[in-house]
Amino acid sequence: MAQLAVTGAAGYIGNLLSRTAATEGWDVRGVDDLTGPISIAPDGIRFLSERFFSPEALRFLEGSEVVLHLAAVSGVMPCANDPVGTREVNVGGTAQLVEWCRARRIPLAFASSLSVVGAPPQMPITETTPANPTHEYARQKAEGERLVSSLRPSGIAGVSVRMSNVYGSYSVSGRTVAKGNVINEFSRQAATGRLRVNSPGTQRRDFIHIADVVKAWLAVADRLRRGAAPNDVYLFASGTAASIREVAARMEAAWRHAHPRRAPLAVDVVENPRGAVELLDERFQVDPRATWESLGMRPSHELDREISRIVADVIPPS
């Protein structure tokens, strides 16, 4: 079996990715320091609880044929509140991992973010849209991209995966795991009968289901193992954008269909805690066709269908 290293293996994406890779025949070694907001050591793989760039972690990962680097202090506000500490991990740690890969000639795929493009003058956003970060989290991700791309002059594949808003849940040992983005937050809020939309609500996002993201990560890993990953940047996005108000309206409509005898969902527009860094461009659109064509696949989870499934599973308020 090919040996796959996954950093951030206990996180929201990393946990499902690690376990899925193991079921598909990879010999997976995962590392995670278990300090993130979602930290569940994955079953079915060899796992070490350490910082991904520690000497112990790097020794544990020896023999890997591909590294998928998902570990990070993630999120806009944590990086804004502690730029020095988060930079030590997200930039300094990534630099150490890149040099470790360079010395062993191991290909590396880096979990970046769509936020690195900032507010581009031209839409839609594609794989070739240059990085132009506007806040600390995006700056750290952009620096990670530059570090990973430095492998290429040495003849080592180093690719960046820019992900849009990942949503969806899965179960681990009876526990439901879901990240706190707007779709997952709305699914929790629906059980109270009220949705809270961060103002102004016209901000547009591209949402992609975690099952499609995991499938795409494994396709990238397979191409890296075979030396067939020419792309510098992959763009994991659905290609269909919606405003937060539109998402709330779709969820409210799905609620009325699923629970016709219950009161309709109320929708409140509230103060936006990320207002200073929120991308508000109403032209926002992503075109990830080059990525999906390169990987020979396409997303299979459509947003409206998933919203209907989410709402049908919600227990209405009494």
Image (spheres, rainbow, N blue to C red):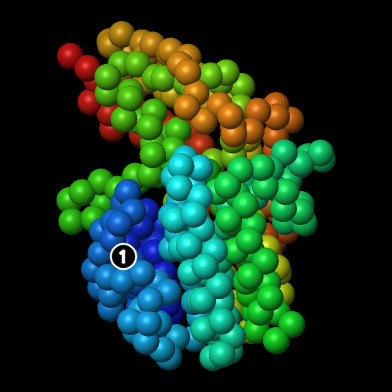
Give me the residue at 40% from left, 71% from top: 52
Q: Where is residue 103 in the image (x, y as percent from the top left)?
A: 56, 90
Judged from this view, the residue extending furthest toward the front is 84
Please state the horizontal and vertical placement of residue 294, each as a whole percent of the image.
Answer: 68, 66
In the displayed structure image, the side of residue 33 where residue 238 appears, left or right? right
**Residue 290 picture location, percent across and down:** 72, 58
Q: Quadrant of the N terminus?
A: bottom left
Seen in the picture, residue 289 relative to 45 is either above or below; the reply is: above
Indicate the quadrant where residue 255 lies.
Answer: top left
Give the total of numbered labels.
1
Give the answer, above or below, for where 154 lies relative to 249: below
- Quarter assignment of residue 85: bottom left
From this view, report whether residue 25 is shown above or below residue 125. Answer: below
Residue at left 33%, top 25%? 189
- Find the residue positioned furthest to the right: 122
Closer to us: 227 or 307? 227
Tell me if residue 217 can be seen.
no
Residue at the spot of label 1: 33
Q: Is residue 250 left or right of residue 116?
A: left
| Of residues 119 and 266, the one drawn nearer to the viewer in this rendering | 119
Q: Residue shown at 63%/61% (left/top)?
A: 143
Q: Is mark 1 on a helix, strand or loop?
A: loop
Whether residue 263 is visible here, answered yes or no, is: yes
Mark 1 neighbour class, 10 Å CA radius: few under 14, some 14 to 19, many 20 or more: some
Amino acid at dot 1: Asp
Classify residue 286 by image quadrant: top right
Residue 23 percent across, percent down from the top left: 34, 73
Residue drawn at point x = 67 percent, y = 66 percent = 146
